[in-house]
């Protein structure tokens, strides 16, 4: 009997524990002192709604699965058929192999072979490492093809403050100054400042009644080049709880999804660090062009307080 997500790899340190799966190198579980930090899924299930998955070689959506790169047209499979889009890359269900595994750290790798719609071979890697500051995730890609390759990356963790109930009792503090406007296919139509709108979470704001499946840009980075999103609440017993998602300056966009159409709805929130905007293979917004032999590396992480 093999679990739907294959082998399960555990790492532990400083009160944190995480489980990473062979399928997709997915973050299935993350706890701190026994409290859930991400909204995971059971070992005998597949990760519905992209829970914990890595999004490479692009995050989010590509319009009609079609794009032109350096004069050549390409057509990807429509993996979001109801909106006629290609979504969240090519590696979510792939079999990743262990490069190194210690008590507090695991590195996994995958060779993404050239294929219809994406004719470049990439060597992909991810490192999950636990420590006093929580979980640190490093995503890497090297272009093994003979020509330039379009690339972007992201991840899809769902967060919980493990209080029961819904996210309406939580506060979101986000450093984003711009919202990417979208149509009913969740494809970009423009941008607007969050100033004076319900989407301005700078300084912290309640999530009560606010629904989002929304991309944000123009993040404020600190002196160390880090942007941080914080979820917080006070429990019925008066305990303060918070979870931070931080991302380096390679990740200049983030997606916030309040899970309104999940069942049960609004019991967790996805906050997705991304190196590029929605439909970047067409718009070029944040698109990375990897030269032959070039390597990309970006870092994000999670801490519980």
Image (cartoon, helix red, strand yellow):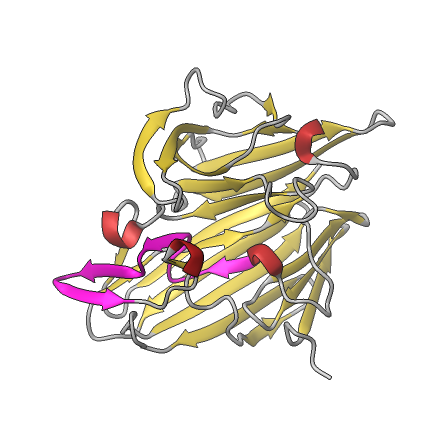
- Please check the rendered image and state whether residue 56 is part of the magenta-colored stretch, yes or no: yes
Question: In what quadrant of the picture does the C terminus appear?
Answer: top right
Q: Residue lying farthest right?
A: 237
**In this picture, residue 119 sits left or right of residue 254:** left
213 or 277, nearer to the observer: 213
Q: Give above or below for 109 relative to 203.
A: below
- Left or right: 203, with 304 as reference point: left
Q: Nearer the viewer, residue 56 or 125?
A: 56
- Residue positioned most to the left: 71
Q: In the visual, does 271 lie left or right of 278?
A: right
Q: Is residue 28 visible?
A: yes
Q: Which residues are magenta?
A: 51-75
Within the image, what quadrant is residue 10 found in? bottom right
The residue lying toward the viewer, choosing from 249 and 199, is 199
Residue at the (24%, 52%) spot, across then down: 282
Residue at the extreme front of the image, as rendered:
82
- Left or right of 265: which side holds 151? left
Position in image of residue 288 (x %, y %): 29, 54
Q: Residue at position x 30%, y 46% from top?
A: 286
Q: Quadrant of residue 297?
A: bottom left
Q: What residue lies at 54% left-to-right and 70% top-to-bottom?
A: 108
Q: Does 177 appear above or below 47?
A: above
Residue 168, how many percent across, how many down?
68, 29
Question: In which quadrant of the rendered image does the N terminus lie?
Answer: bottom right
The answer to whether residue 88 of the structure is visible from this angle is no
The image shows residue 261 at horizontal and vertical percentages of 59, 45
- Spot the residue most to the top: 196
Residue 79, image x, y percentages: 42, 64
Query: How many numbered discs, if any?
Result: 0
Specify whether residue 162 is painted magenta: no
């Amino acid at each position: 009997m093999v679990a739907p997500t294959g082998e399960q790899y555990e790492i532990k340190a400083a009160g944190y524990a995480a489980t990473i799966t062979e399928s997709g190198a997915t973050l299935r579980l993350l706890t701190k002192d026994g409290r859930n930090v991400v909204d995971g899924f059971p070992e005998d299930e597949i990760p519905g709604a992209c829970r914990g998955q890595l999004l490479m070689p692009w995050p989010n959506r590509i319009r009609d699965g079609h794009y032109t790169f350096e004069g050549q047209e390409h057509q990807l499979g429509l993996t979001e058929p109801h909106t006629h889009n290609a979504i969240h890359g090519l590696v979510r269900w792939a079999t990743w192999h262990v490069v190194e595994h210690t008590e507090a750290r695991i590195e996994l790798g995958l060779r993404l072979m050239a294929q219809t719609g994406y004719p470049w071979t990439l060597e992909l890697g991810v490192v999950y490492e636990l420590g006093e500051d929580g979980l640190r995730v490093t995503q890497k890609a090297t272009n093994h093809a003979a020509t330039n390759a379009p690339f972007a990356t992201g991840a899809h963790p769902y967060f919980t403050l493990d209080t029961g109930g819904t996210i309406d009792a939580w506060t979101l503090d986000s450093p984003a100054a711009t919202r990417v406007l979208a149509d009913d296919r969740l494809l970009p139509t423009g941008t607007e400042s969050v100033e004076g709108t319900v989407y301005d979470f700078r300084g912290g704001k309640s999530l009560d009644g606010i629904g989002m499946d929304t991309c944000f840009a123009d993040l404020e980075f600190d002196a160390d080049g880090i942007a941080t999103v914080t979820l917080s609440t006070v429990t019925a017993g008066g305990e303060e709880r918070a979870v931070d998602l931080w991302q380096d300056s390679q990740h200049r966009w983030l997606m916030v999804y309040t899970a309104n159409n999940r069942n049960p709805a609004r019991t967790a929130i996805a906050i997705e660090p991304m190196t590029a905007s929605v439909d970047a293979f067409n718009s070029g917004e944040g698109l990375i062009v990897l030269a032959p032999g070039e390597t990309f590396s970006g870092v994000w992480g999670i801490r519980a307080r």
